[in-house]
Image (cartoon, helix red, strand yellow):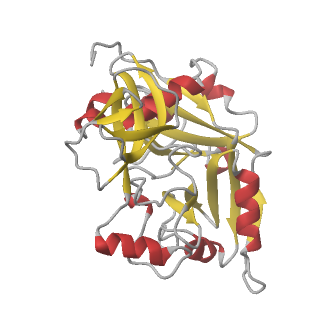
């Protein structure tokens, strides 16, 4: 692999296609508690978390970013999932639940900032806590009505999600280069960050996707809990998401096989990295030993160790 590289500049990515909605009322957190994997009820003011909306058999519907601000819970969906997640939550509001659900895409803009100087840029506009932690929420310097931000998966140094009222995004983004979809894909693969429609879908269970931080194993019942709890207690995952390198470029999704033709999993995404060459993410069956050679058709595939995560964020 070629590890010589120039550190990328700080860039912004438009997330207006992501769904965003506000949940208010006495039972707002309790509703998410029974529908998703994490302990939403325990969420403190100006804190956030990831939580997975799951099917009855524990499959991923969407990975949500939820934030508690004053009397509301913000819910951020994956790209283009706002309407379907809104409908899913709405139909699960029982007649005695005190919950109101309000779409916020028309009132608020959303974007992400990535790169080595992302935190310094965000600090010019938001009140950051003395000790930064992922999912903490920082209010705007002019007050929470002017927006909020939260650390997200770091890509090339740092990552921040910013939500501001419509028309205010240009204040932070006008001087920054835009991060294209292809570049974001590359950076995500380098860092091992799963994306909806690829590694996150109803084909997979959250534990297989490495979403342990989005799961509480101490909370009460939720949709899909039995499958996920059983998988955790037995320590058995049918497959696991891993980073890979490939000898040549392939089109994803692509079947992953052993030298003798056995099914070994699937390559979900690929990209070309100036530092690592042909790279990708793949769900690899745990029954396939780590030292077994893998192939996409005739292309050799190599699993990547966790040390790559550190290199990717240099």
Q: In the image, is 260 to the left or to the right of 188?
A: left
Quadrant hosting residue 276? top left
Q: Nearer the viewer, residue 229 or 16?
A: 229
98 is higher (above) or lower (below) than 186: below
Q: In the image, is 21 to the left or to the right of 66?
A: right
Quadrant hosting residue 155? top left
Q: Is residue 305 visible?
A: yes
| Image position, residue 88 (x, y; %) | 72, 65
| Image position, residue 233 (x, y; %) | 31, 75
Q: Nearer the viewer, residue 96 or 245?
A: 245
Q: Is residue 158 visible?
A: no
Residue at 39%, 20% in the rendered image: 248
| Image position, residue 24 (x, y; %) | 70, 69
Q: Nearer the viewer, residue 212 or 179?
A: 212
Residue sticking out furthest to the front: 260
| Image position, residue 17 (x, y; %) | 70, 40
Number of marks in picture: 0
Residue sticking out furthest to the bottom: 96
Residue at 70%, 59% in the rendered image: 85
Quadrant hosting residue 235? bottom left
Residue at 54%, 63% in the rendered image: 59
Residue at 51%, 64% in the rendered image: 45
Q: In the image, is 213 to the left or to the right of 201?
A: left
In the rendered image, which quarter contains the C terminus?
top left
107 is higher (above) or lower (below) than 253: below
In the rendered image, which quarter contains the N terminus?
top left
Q: Nearer the viewer, residue 135 or 273?
A: 273
């Amino acid at each position: 692999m070629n590890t010589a590289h120039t550190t990328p500049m700080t860039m912004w990515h438009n997330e207006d296609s992501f769904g965003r909605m506000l949940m208010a009322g006495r039972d707002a957190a309790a509703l998410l508690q029974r529908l998703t994997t994490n302990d939403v009820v325990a969420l403190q003011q100006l804190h956030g978390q990831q939580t997975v909306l799951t099917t009855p058999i524990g499959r991923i519907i969407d990975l949500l970013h939820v934030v508690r601000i004053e009397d509301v819970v913000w819910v951020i969906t994956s790209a283009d999932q706002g309407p379907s997640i809104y409908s899913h939550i709405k139909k699960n509001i029982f007649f005695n639940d005190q919950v109101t659900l309000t779409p916020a895409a028309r009132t608020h803009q959303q974007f992400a900032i990535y790169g080595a100087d992302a935190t310094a840029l965000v600090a010019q506009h938001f009140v950051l806590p003395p000790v930064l932690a992922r999912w903490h929420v920082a209010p705007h310097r002019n007050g929470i009505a002017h927006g909020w931000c939260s650390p997200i998966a770091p890509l090339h140094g740092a990552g921040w999600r910013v939500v501001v009222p419509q028309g205010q995004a240009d204040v932070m983004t006008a001087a920054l280069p835009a991060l294209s979809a292809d570049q974001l894909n590359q950076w995500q693969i380098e860092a091992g960050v799963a994306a909806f429609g690829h590694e996150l879908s109803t084909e997979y269970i959250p534990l297989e996707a490495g979403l342990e931080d989005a799961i509480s194993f101490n909370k009460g019942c939720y949709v899909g809990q039995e499958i996920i709890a059983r998988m955790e207690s037995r320590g058995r995952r049918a497959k696991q998401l891993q980073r890979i390198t490939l000898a040549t470029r392939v089109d994803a999704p692509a079947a992953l096989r052993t030298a003798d033709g056995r099914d070994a999993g699937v390559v979900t995404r690929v990209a070309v990295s100036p530092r690592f060459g042909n790279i990708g993410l793949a769900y690899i069956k745990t029954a396939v030993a780590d030292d077994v050679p893998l192939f996409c058709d005739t292309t050799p595939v190599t699993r990547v160790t966790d040390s790559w995560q550190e290199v990717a964020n240099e």
